Amino acid sequence: MKIKITGKELKITEAINDYVEKKLDRIDKYFEDAEAEVTLRTEKNEQIAEIYVIANGEKYRAVTEDKDMYASIDKDIDILEGQIRKAKTKKEKMMKEASIKTMEVVNENKNEINDEIIKTSYYEIKPMTPEDAVLKLKEKPTHNFLVFVNVETGKVNAVHKLKDGKNYGLVEPEA
């Protein structure tokens, strides 16, 4: 595992460095090739540890604060391990269900449903600028659009990713 440790307003000692590397071995066992960025900082009386792991195209992040830096690092590792296990379980479940679904699709093609709403999603619409909406959409790589209330016009708008994958479109009502 490639590890990059940064200290903000905090000197990274050899002991902290060794401790972080030892703890990240718990994460490394889940992946063949992973990268970790660790940022340690102090704010007032709190010791804040932020660990960001990238592996197999997936991103995992944990930020905790505690009076003790070592405790903060331990909490981050626990959080990351939980996120990784949850993602792995979800992937395994999807792989298992995918094979079952392909069997069901072959049998159910005769009763295919067309032109009906088969799924409804609910979410909160927040007031923001179109630029903020684009930033929010970038945070969620699996989402293709974001609906929001434009603070400049007071109307409901939507931003969406364009097919080029680099740019965004804005949908505004005319009236």
Image (spheres, rainbow, N blue to C red):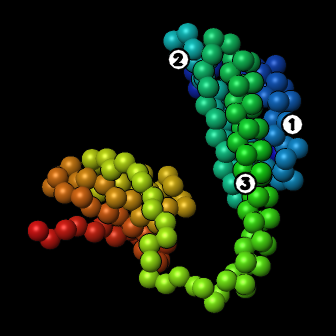
Residue at disc 2, secondary structure: strand
Closer-to-camera residue (52/93)? 93
In this view of the protein, can residue 140 be seen by the observer?
A: yes
Residue for badge 2: 43
Query: In 3D space, how far apart are the residues under numbered discs 3 and 2 (Cα atoms)?
Result: 36 Å
Q: Is residue 13 above or below residue 143?
A: above
Q: Residues within 10 Å of mark 2 (few under 14, many from 20)?
A: few
Residue 27: percent from the left, percent from the top?
Answer: 81, 40
* Residue type of the residue flagged with mark 3: Lys
Q: Is residue 106 above or below residue 56?
A: below
Q: Is residue 66 left or right of residue 14?
A: left
Residue for badge 1: 25
Quadrant in the rendering for residue 50? top right
Residue 170: percent from the left, percent from the top?
Answer: 30, 67
Residue at 53 percent across and 82 percent down: it is 113
* Residue type of the residue flagged with mark 2: Glu
Residue at 28 percent across and 48 percent down: it is 128
- Look at discs 3 and 2 and give the one toward the viewer: 3
Q: Residues within 10 Å of mark 3 (few under 14, many from 20)?
A: few
Residue 72: percent from the left, percent from the top?
Answer: 68, 21
* Residue type of the residue flagged with mark 1: Asp
Residue for badge 3: 90
Q: Is residue 1 above or below residue 168?
A: above
Most extreme residue toward the front is: 111
Q: Is there a contact, CB below 8 Å, between mark 2 and mark 1?
A: no
Instruction: Say which quadrant the N terminus sits in.
Output: top right
Quadrant in the rendering for residue 47? top right
Residue at 73 percent across and 85 percent down: it is 106
Quadrant in the rendering for residue 73? top right
Query: In 3D space, how far apart are the residues under numbered discs 2 and 1 (Cα atoms)?
Result: 27 Å
Q: Earlier in the sequence, mark 3 or mark 1?
A: 1
